[in-house]
Amino acid sequence: MNLNSSVLPLILTVLIGSGVKAQTLDISENLVNFNSAEGESLLLESEARQDYFPLSIQFVTQNNLAYCGVASIVMVLNAMSIEAPEAPEYRNYRIFTQENLFNNPQTQQVMTAEDVRRGGMTLEQLGLLLASYSVRVEVHYGSDVTLDEFRSLVVENLQRSDNFVLVNYSRPSIGQERGGHISPIAAYNEATDRFLVLDVARYKYPPVWVKVEELWEAMKTLDSVSGKTRGFVLISPSLSGNEVLF
């Protein structure tokens, strides 16, 4: 979906003017707060922003401190209109939620909700959980891609509809608190070479524009659980059912 400048201001108002600000932590000077005049301008000036609108409609806050990956997966699956399970809390309506994501037997074979609550998830587990539904997933470790490859792969994805990017990165590497985190990338601003990360920990940080090189460095950090670096996943529709590529 192409978003022109007359439509975007309304979308911006809906996303950043409806409680996202909350009482979030201050962000470091290397980041640009999306909830600012500069942050809004960066989106308006972006050409690679096809993921922004569908993700903003499905934007959710992670249910607990370990559920950043779960919230990110739910956003993407709903944005892709993948056939969703029943959600009893919404009567006869179907939508992916952070509660029903694990109702799929194939998902439970990867890991359970309790597994995630205890320790979050690695990049590999993120890819496998996504692939337990009918999508195509490409898993890229930060150690395996150059800066130019990272930028090129993500920008190409952001320029096309119906496919998405989730990034697994170290918060301290970009000037934020605590450890590893997962969230969707929604847009790219070429003039400033920044990606817009829609942070699902909305109680803690707002969406931010981060320099591509800084995010790349943050992906190359070691995940102590897997013993591998963090990275990113590309998600697209699949004609052949579940598919995951490493």
Image (spheres, rainbow, N blue to C red):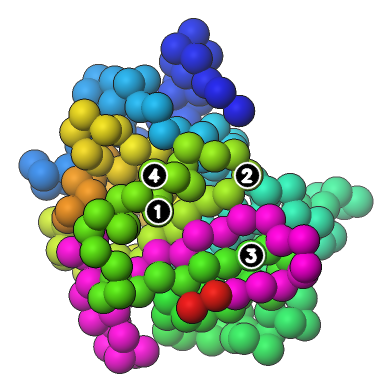
Q: Amino acid at mark 3?
A: Arg
Please name the residue that numbered disc 3 is placed on.
136
Please name the residue that numbered disc 4 is placed on.
155
203 is higher (above) or lower (below) than 161: below
Q: Residue furthest right?
A: 92
Residue 153 marker = 1
Q: Amino acid at mark 1?
A: Leu
Camera-nearest residue between 132 and 72:
132
Q: Within the magenta stretch, is there residue 199?
A: no
Residue 175, given in percent of the width and then of the height, sits at: 13, 56
Q: CA distance from mark 1 to mark 4?
A: 6 Å
Taking the image as shown, residue 37 lies to the left or right of residue 17, namely: left
Of label 2 and label 4, which has the lower sequence position?
4
Q: CA distance from mark 1 to mark 2?
A: 15 Å
Contact check, label 1 and label 2, Cβ < 8 Å: no
Q: Quadrant of residue 245?
A: bottom right
Of label 4 and label 3, which has the lower sequence position?
3
Q: CA distance from mark 3 to mark 1?
A: 15 Å
Residue 176, given in percent of the width and then of the height, sits at: 18, 58
Contact check, label 1 and label 4, Cβ < 8 Å: yes
11 is higher (above) or lower (below) than 124: above
Q: How many marks?
A: 4
